Image (cartoon, coloured by chain):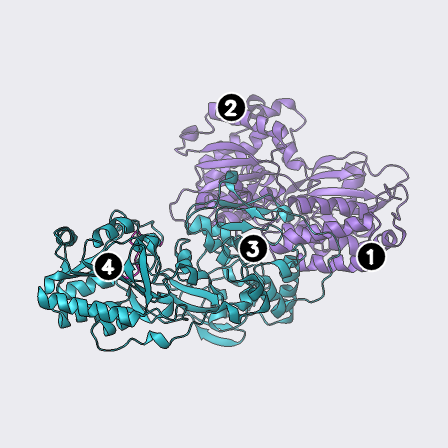
Chain colours: A purple, B cyan
């Protein structure tokens, strides 16, 4: 099998970044088509396409749009470009290589949900993305694709880029809304949901970069054509950012349902010679890890990975070979979630710190055998108990690492060093 | 009125009730820290978890509005386990310094852990270190390590006092309460943050380290600090009064009271009080029995009325005393004596109409409205100017003044006493001693009165709402109520207060107090 380049077709061309180059390859033609459609028809088309949120949760996009109340209030469209999940870098590629593709997708989406104002909330570290998006938005205004009466359709739309300050939690949609409102970036209680009461307490739709960009091809070719890619429940293509122990890490677009092992061996050129696949994290650091055996059988779609107890998440595939120690890795992951917990909900605030300290004590040789089970119990009590999913995001890797690689943890506790030859603390 | 099942009990609740309120209504235990009925829902302590029928995920009761037919429980094993662990999460970084913590005895962590806790601590790593003994303002101290970040205080300053001094800074388990730009927390409602703090993170500078709460008794009453009439709880023991806290009343003060109101206990305590009657004038005071003085005063009043006429006796009343007392006094004055010279002493005329938009009013008397009501009913409120003229013309033989309970709210005390001193004789009725009064040059009887803490009565607040209060304890045995004063003045009795013994005797208390002496 090969890559299916529905979104990334022209990513290799530098001219695609600018407006002229983008137009040369058919840019803003879909917008012209969409502006002549009935907004409701666009929502129906997106519903029919089976597009699911590409940010991690996988919620059907058209259904989400349908939650907006029809009460005549101003409503906002927010693009979530706060890509912070360790291992994820596909949105960055999209914004750097094709900013206009995102902007066009956003204008179409905004037209569909009748929003006159949108923001792209970009992760603070992505300075190049911010510069490119700002330039592209200026070009779009100059080209008449943004502002008043877009292409004579009577539809007005303004767009702005907003820079985050590097907080992972601002990638959670209500955390992002808090941050955008100028408050401390921490998630809000739900209900009310953003579609009813979001940014500035007005109805708000928050979609991931890739989701919004995918709206273009769906409207261009129709839902049926989009559905030809992928599986029945996971329609379309998806960008995967593959990192870790592969020869060619990078961003690859493949149809959903693509075998994970092909992604590793074909697209990414396989592992270094002499190394053996040990584990794969299929959907960013919060997704439960898969063992090599599981990874062999896995296909990259929502239902297969869910069936294996993991998740597709943001599509960040982290490939782990046999030179890596799972205890050391978990320590890094736990440090991340401890550092990024917003501190609102007690189980997350205290639990992330506790888990980090426990795994840290194992790595420094002060661990006790009962700590291994304690990690499992603490993690399980952190799941499903908090306002947002950060607590679960910290608990899931902890549980899966300990359950699937328990021998490495026990060895570490007993010997005070890693079991894995070639790893840092062996 | 939706019906809801709470742990199997079916109850009917008001439209819009939160599930946590339904649990409380059904008298079912439900652990919680961050939720407070007077504040918005934060939903962060995650302790009020419930299982709702038909919902696979656990929900927090404080963010769930009850709907018809809802069935929820928090007595399943799953919830019990969740609450146990939830409490453990709260405690892993808590210093557990209960023996030196002022909140001990009324601490949410202690109480709820005893009820729902896990009892098997498993945290063996180092705790997070945070700032301690941080002075947030004039009245409040913060210990960040004890703080469980429930955000009640932050929500209070943003929603009730609307002063927004407090915020949570930093993230995760490094998060701490603090003030923006180091600006102090010094609004007039800052002590409410101490009340609502479920742990010992925020403590009162005025109260901390003065008493262990389990040595305190309490009684409810009405705040005399201003005309709002906040419902209060006064905490005291044999050593005296130690603090005042608000008592919820949805019609008056909801859950709060102001910081100024909390000061009122200070003038009730023994060292501020006029403990015995005395007669004389500046530089020459004799300690006497109240009844004796009052009999003398009564005779003088009757003599003046008989010899010269009822206009020679005047009476000055403040909004400080109760309805019942004023009614007695006024009845005696108008009935027995047929005098009509009653004047209303407005202690701070410029501020009388002030209101801060929350609770505090410029009229710093608990019963102005009640007094004015009585005067209006009897049609006897004479203009103040008339009193000034008469005193200046030397035509007042006896002046009766029902003076301030708390002299600190009478900024014009000196000026007024200078005026009152022009009467030939002065009967000064007050619960507090005052150096200013001791400087009066005219022959004067000073009679010690009871404070609101020591008597029953009714105040009428600014809304016209009658609020009854009951005696809590006696501090000055020789103090009388105005009712008793009237009895003796009119010759109808001896007054009942002579036999009362003080409930507050520091000598009776423990060894350490005896060593230390009274506070």
Q: CA distance from mark 4 to mark 3?
A: 66 Å
At numbered mark 3, what does the secondary structure look like: helix, strand or loop? loop
At numbered mark 2, what does the secondary structure look like: helix, strand or loop? helix
Does B389 appear above or below B3?
Answer: above
Q: Nearer the viewer, residue B1 or B103?
A: B103
Q: Chain of mark 3?
A: B
Q: Quadrant of residue B121?
A: bottom right
Find residue A40 and report its horizontal and vertical position in percent: 45, 45
* Mark drawn on residue A384: none
Q: Residues within 10 Å of mark 4 (few under 14, many from 20)?
A: some
Same chain letter for marks 4 and 3: yes
* Mark drawn on residue B44: 3
Examine the structure image and report whether residue B5 is included in the region drawn in magenta. no
At numbered mark 1, what does the secondary structure look like: helix, strand or loop? loop
Please count the marks in the image. Answer: 4
Q: Which residue is mark 1?
A: A368
* Mark drawn on residue A139: 2
Q: CA distance from mark 1 to mark 4?
A: 85 Å
Residue A79 lies left or right of residue B350; in this view the side is: right
Q: CA distance from mark 2 to mark 1?
A: 60 Å
């Amino acid at each position: 099998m090969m890559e299916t380049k529905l979104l990334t077709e022209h990513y290799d061309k530098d001219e695609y970044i600018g407006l002229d180059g983008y137009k040369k390859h058919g840019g803003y033609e879909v917008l012209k088509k969409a502006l002549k459609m009935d907004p409701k028809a666009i929502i129906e088309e997106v519903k029919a396409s089976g597009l699911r949120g590409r940010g991690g949760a996988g919620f059907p996009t058209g259904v989400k749009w349908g939650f907006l109340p029809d009460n005549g209030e101003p409503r906002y469209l927010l693009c979530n470009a706060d890509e912070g999940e360790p291992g994820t870098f596909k949105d960055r590629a999209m914004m750097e290589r094709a900013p206009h593709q995102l902007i066009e997708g956003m204008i179409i989406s905004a037209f569909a949900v009748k929003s006159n104002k949108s923001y792209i909330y970009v992760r603070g570290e992505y300075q190049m993305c911010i510069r490119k998006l700002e330039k592209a938005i200026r070009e779009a205004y100059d080209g008449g694709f943004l502002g008043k009466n877009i292409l004579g359709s009577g539809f007005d739309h303004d767009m702005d880029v907003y820079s985050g300050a590097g907080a992972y939690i601002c990638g959670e949609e209500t955390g992002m809304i808090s941050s955008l409102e100028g408050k401390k970036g921490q998630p809000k209680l739900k209900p009310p949901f953003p579609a009813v009461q979001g940014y500035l307490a007005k109805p708000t739709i928050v979609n991931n970069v890739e989701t919004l960009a995918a709206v273009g091809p769906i409207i261009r070719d129709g839902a049926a054509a989009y559905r030809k890619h992928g599986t029945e429940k996971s329609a379309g293509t998806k960008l995967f950012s593959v990192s870790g122990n592969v020869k060619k890490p990078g961003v690859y677009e493949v149809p959903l349902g693509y075998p994970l092992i092909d992604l590793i061996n074909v697209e990414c050129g396989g592992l270094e010679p002499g190394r053996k696949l040990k584990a794969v994290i299929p959907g960013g650091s919060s997704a439960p890890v898969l063992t090599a055996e599981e990874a062999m059988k896995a296909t990259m779609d929502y239902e297969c990975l869910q069936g294996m107890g993991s998740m597709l998440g943001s599509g960040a595939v982290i490939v782990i070979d046999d030179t890596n120690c799972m205890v050391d890795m978990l320590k890094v992951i736990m440090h991340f979630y401890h550092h990024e917990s917003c501190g609102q909900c007690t189980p997350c605030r205290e639990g992330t710190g506790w888990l980090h300290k426990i795994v840290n004590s194992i790595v420094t040789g002060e661990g006790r055998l009962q700590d291994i089970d304690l990690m499992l119990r603490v993690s399980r009590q952190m799941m499903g108990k908090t306002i947002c999913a950060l607590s679960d995001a910290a608990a899931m890797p902890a549980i899966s690492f300990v359950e699937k690689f328990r021998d490495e943890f026990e060895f570490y506790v007993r010997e005070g060093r890693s079991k894995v030859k070639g790893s840092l603390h062996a | 009125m939706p019906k809801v099942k709470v742990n199997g009990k079916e109850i009917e609740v008001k439209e819009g009730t939160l599930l946590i309120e339904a649990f409380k209504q059904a008298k079912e235990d439900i652990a919680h820290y961050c939720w407070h009925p007077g504040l918005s829902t934060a939903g962060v302590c995650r302790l009020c978890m419930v299982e709702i029928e038909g919902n696979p995920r656990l929900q927090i009761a404080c963010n769930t509005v009850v709907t018809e037919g809802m069935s929820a429980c928090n007595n399943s094993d799953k919830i019990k386990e969740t609450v146990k662990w939830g409490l453990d999460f709260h405690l892993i970084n808590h210093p557990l310094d209960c023996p030196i913590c002022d909140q001990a005895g009324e601490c949410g962590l202690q109480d709820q852990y005893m009820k729902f806790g896990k009892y098997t601590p498993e945290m063996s790593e180092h705790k997070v270190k945070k700032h301690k003994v941080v002075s947030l303002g004039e009245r409040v101290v913060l210990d960040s390590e004890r703080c469980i970040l429930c955000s009640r205080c932050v929500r209070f300053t943003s929603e009730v006092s609307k002063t927004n001094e407090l915020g949570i800074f930093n993230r995760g388990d490094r998060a701490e309460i603090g003030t923006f730009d180091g600006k102090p927390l010094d609004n007039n409602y800052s002590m409410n943050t101490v009340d609502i703090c479920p742990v010992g993170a925020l403590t009162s500078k005025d109260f901390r380290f003065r008493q262990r709460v389990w040595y305190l008794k309490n009684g409810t009453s009405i705040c005399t600090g201003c005309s709002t009439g906040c419902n209060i709880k006064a905490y005291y023991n044999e050593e005296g009064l130690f603090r005042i806290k608000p008592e919820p009343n949805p019609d008056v003060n909801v859950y709060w009271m102001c910081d100024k109101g909390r000061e009122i206990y200070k003038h009730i305590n023994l060292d501020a009080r006029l403990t015995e009657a005395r007669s004389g004038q500046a530089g020459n005071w004799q300690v006497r029995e109240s009844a004796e003085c009052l009999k003398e005063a009564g005779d003088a009043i009757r003599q003046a009325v008989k010899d010269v006429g009822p206009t020679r006796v005047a009476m000055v009343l403040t909004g400080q005393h109760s309805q019942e007392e004023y009614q007695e006094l006024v009845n005696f004055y108008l009935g027995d004596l047929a005098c009509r010279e009653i004047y209303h002493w407005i202690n701070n005329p410029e501020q009388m109409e002030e209101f801060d938009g929350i609770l505090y009013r410029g009229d710093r008397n608990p019963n102005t409205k009640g007094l004015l009501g009585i005067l209006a009913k009897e049609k006897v409120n004479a203009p103040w100017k008339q009193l000034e003229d008469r005193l200046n013309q030397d035509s007042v033989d006896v002046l009766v003044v029902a003076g301030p309970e708390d002299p600190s709210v009478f900024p014009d005390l000196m000026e007024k006493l200078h005026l009152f001193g022009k009467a030939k004789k002065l009967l000064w009725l007050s619960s507090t001693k005052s150096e200013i009064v001791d400087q009066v040059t005219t022959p004067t009887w000073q009679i010690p009165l009871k404070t609101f803490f020591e008597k029953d009565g009714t105040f009428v607040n600014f809304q016209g709402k009658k609020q009854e209060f009951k005696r809590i304890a006696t501090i000055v045995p020789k103090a009388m109520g105005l009712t008793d004063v009237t009895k003796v003045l009119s010759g109808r009795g001896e007054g009942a207060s002579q036999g009362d013994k003080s409930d507050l005797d520091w000598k009776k208390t423990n060894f350490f107090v005896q060593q230390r002496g009274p506070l």
